Image: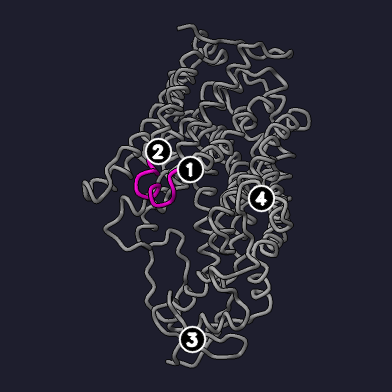
Amino acid sequence: MSTITATSGKAGGMTKDERFVILASSLGTVFEWYDFYLYGSLASIIGAQFFSAYPPATRDIFALLAFAAGFLVRPFGAIVFGRVGDIVGRKYTFLVTILIMGLSTFIVGLLPNAATIGIAAPIILIALRLLQGLALGGEYGGAATYVAEHAPMGKRGYYTSFIQTTATLGLFLSLLIILFTRTILGEPEFAAWGWRIPFLLSVVLLGISVWIRLRLNESPVFQKMKEEGKGSKAPLTEAFANWSNAKLVIIALLGGVMGQGVVWYTGQFYALFFLQSILQVDGYTANLLIAWSLLLGTGFFIVFGALSDKIGRKPIILGGCLIAALTFFPIFRMISTNANPTLEKAIESVKVQVVADPKGCGDLFNPVGTRVFSAPCDLARDFLAKSSVKYETVAGAAGSPVLIRINGKDVPYTKPADSNAGATAALQEAGYPKRGANPTLVKMNHPFDIFKPQVAAIIGLLFILVIYVTMVYGPIAAMLVELFPTKIRYTSMSLPYHIGNGWFGGLLPATSFAIVAATGDIYAGLWYPIIFALITVVVGFFFLPETKDVDITK
């Protein structure tokens, strides 16, 4: 089989073979993200299939925890595969990672459910999720490093920005295939067995990716280093035990990737969660709104990647973090106004208080969803948070029963919280909309139903959030590659990237909703990305070096 090779470091345009390198690396990474996001998109169905021995709420918790496990192990995958990539080579390593990722996803499509093989089903599922997370931990660093080491001097931001589009395109592809399969089969058949089809289709994508990557040759920068005998025999030690390099890893995380990760996950994932779980928009409409914003905004990854070649990585990344932090609150408030104006009006005009003995109230911070509340005060507040009601907690007399006070009218709290009919009726009488019967709620009946004023306004606001994502994410690959020397580049750049995105970003939706539940304010969850984005602005401004003119062949 013939292979494609290229040289790097020249100032002119790229050859046809070099453009193929960029396309092949980006396309393979699209497929990897497609595999990874399938699970997140189908978590509720997977919960019913593999955790059926538990109540519905517990199934969802376990399904989401299994999804989170894939994020948590990503830094370990970065360490394992980063070391292999710096010792053995870039091409070999990201060929292995895509095989692990693709086969793990394909096996999920074949895996018998809990009703068939019992507890073995969830155990195998979680093991496959861990393998996916490990593989993705090694994939991104390999693809970004490989592309950057082929790119001409002065165009690394532009060419690596194609890698940056892959996460959005992978999410978009997974949503399209899921929506298409659901439409063809219908919801009952899809929930019963049709959900397996998108997982099984990944084997086709895997075959294409492997074929493409087998045609590639090793990175010329890495190959030259190996021929000169300058490679590292202990990349982990050199990357993290050497303070001069370890310091750069910490600066890259706190002064770049951490803020990038929270801005990215707010704009694409928390926005979807906010629409569905807080504003009560139906799943079909919410996914279409996000899909349209991604379709309109994805090209700006390349725009800002190319712009970073001219004005630098640092001003674009830090500028995106700062603008996002300053505007998240007004943008999400405007999304509420357009998506569910009745709810937004009720939040502003209806005063709701939980009156209880402070000794009977705990905290509601529950980012992984595993805590079970039993105290009446906690159950009442949990009920209001899940009903998207803004409330505050006020102290009642010692030993007094819990009351929900709505515009001065006291309603006794009665168990269970999820069917508190008295409080629900009082909230609706005060102005809160009834779930499933809210005529002002935004609704899309088909994918091209985009000219309603509500729909167009929300897509525009979501598009702004995607622009923020493209600002912080478009130049980040080039910056990370340029920060570290060739012999430990794969290892050094992968760890801060996956801590920033896998931990700070990946855990954002659950943690932000936990903040909403704990405070009684539907917008309070935005403090999570705002605080971390502002920390990145400060640390990055003072400590992060500009890298666009660095010679990466050394």
- Which element carries disc 2, helix, strand or loop? helix
Q: In terms of depth relative to the viewer, which is nearer, 76 or 450?
A: 450
Q: Which residue is mark 1?
A: 178
Q: Looking at the image, which residue sits at the far right? A: 311
The segment highlighted magenta reads 184-197
Up/down of 44 relative to 298, above or below? below
The answer, for residue 64, to whether it is visible in the render is no
Structural crowding at the residue carrying mark 3, measured as other residues with C-alpha within 10 Å and reported as few (<14), some (14–19) or many (≥20): many
Q: Which residue is mark 2?
A: 197
Q: Quadrant of the C terminus?
A: top right
Residue 430 horizontal/vertical position (percent): 61, 83
What's the CA distance linking mark 4 and mark 3? Answer: 47 Å
Up/down of 546 relative to 374, above or below? above
Q: Amino acid at mark 4?
A: Asp
Q: Earlier in the sequence, mark 2 or mark 1?
A: 1
Q: In terms of depth relative to the viewer, which is nearer, 241 or 427?
A: 427
Q: Earlier in the sequence, mark 4 or mark 3?
A: 3
Q: Amino acid at mark 2?
A: Ile
Q: In terms of depth relative to the viewer, which is nearer, 135 or 56?
A: 56
- Which element carries disc 4, helix, strand or loop? loop
Image mark for residue 356: 3
- Which element carries disc 1, helix, strand or loop? helix
Labelled pair 2, 4 in contact (Cβ < 8 Å): no
Does the magenta-highlighted stretch encompass residue 195? Answer: yes
Image mark for residue 449: 4
Q: Earlier in the sequence, mark 2 or mark 3?
A: 2
Asked if residue 394 lies left or right of residue 78, the reply is right
